[in-house]
């Protein structure tokens, strides 16, 4: 199972996305297109919180929820983690083909 953690960092007014393993090219392109940048020093993807970023994270979570093989943990700095969601097995590349989830 692959682990993904989405952190709402209220102190920095940002969103951080941590992957257990390097995500595929389609996932990285999705993140870049939606304003995320890679922090080589800290080892996670990050973006300042905005309406566009919030919508992208919602879309990202909907795509990840389709995969049994992916465990998503959503936390806010200083708060307990929210439960993960999953549904059907898929790979990252399959999840990020096509347009937005409707």
Image (cartoon, rainbow, N blue to C red):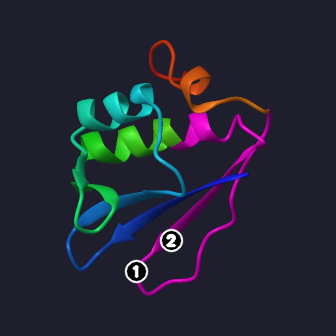
Q: Is residue 41 above or below residue 78?
A: above
The numbered disc on residue 102 is: none
Q: Secondary structure at mark 2?
A: strand
Write the residue at 46% across / 46% down: 22
Say which residue appears at 47% left-offset and 40% top-offset. Answer: 23
Q: Which residues are magenta?
A: 61-88
- The answer to whether residue 36 is magenta is no
* C-alpha separation, residue under disc 1 versus residue under disc 2: 6 Å
Q: Locate the C terminus by quadrant.
A: top right
Q: Which mark is residue 77?
A: 1
Question: Is disc 1 surrounded by few (<14), some (14 to 19) or many (20+) residues within 10 Å?
Answer: few
Whole-percent x, y for residue 44 in the image: 34, 59
Task: Residue at 20% x, 73% y: name it.
Answer: 12
In this view of the protein, which residue sits in the foreground, 63 or 45?
45
Query: Mark 2 packing: few (<14 Cα in 10 Å), some, or many (20+)?
Result: some
Q: Could you say where residue 80 lies in the image, as x and y percent from the top left? A: 57, 82
Horizontal relation, residue 67 to residue 40: left or right: right
Please identify the dominant SS of the magenta region: loop
Asked where in the image residue 7 lies, by quadrant, the reply is: bottom left
On whether residue 67 falls in the magenta region, the answer is yes
Find disc 2 in the rendering and name its residue: 75
Cβ atoms under marks 1 and 2 closer than 8 Å: yes
Q: Is residue 7 left or right of residue 33?
A: right
Task: Determine the secondary structure under disc 1.
Answer: loop
Q: Return the x and y of residue 14 as percentages of the image width and height.
A: 25, 63
Q: Residue furthest bottom?
A: 78
């Amino acid at each position: 199972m692959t682990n993904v953690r989405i952190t709402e960092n209220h102190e920095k007014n940002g969103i951080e996305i941590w992957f257990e393993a390097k995500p595929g090219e389609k996932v990285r392109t999705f993140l870049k297109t939606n304003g995320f940048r890679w922090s080589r020093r800290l080892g996670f993807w990050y973006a300042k919180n905005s309406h566009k970023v919030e919508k992208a994270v919602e879309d990202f979570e909907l795509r990840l929820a389709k995969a049994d093989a992916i465990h998503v943990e959503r936390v806010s700095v200083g708060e307990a983690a929210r439960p993960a969601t999953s549904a059907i097995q898929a790979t990252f590349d399959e999840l990020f083909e096509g347009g937005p989830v409707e």
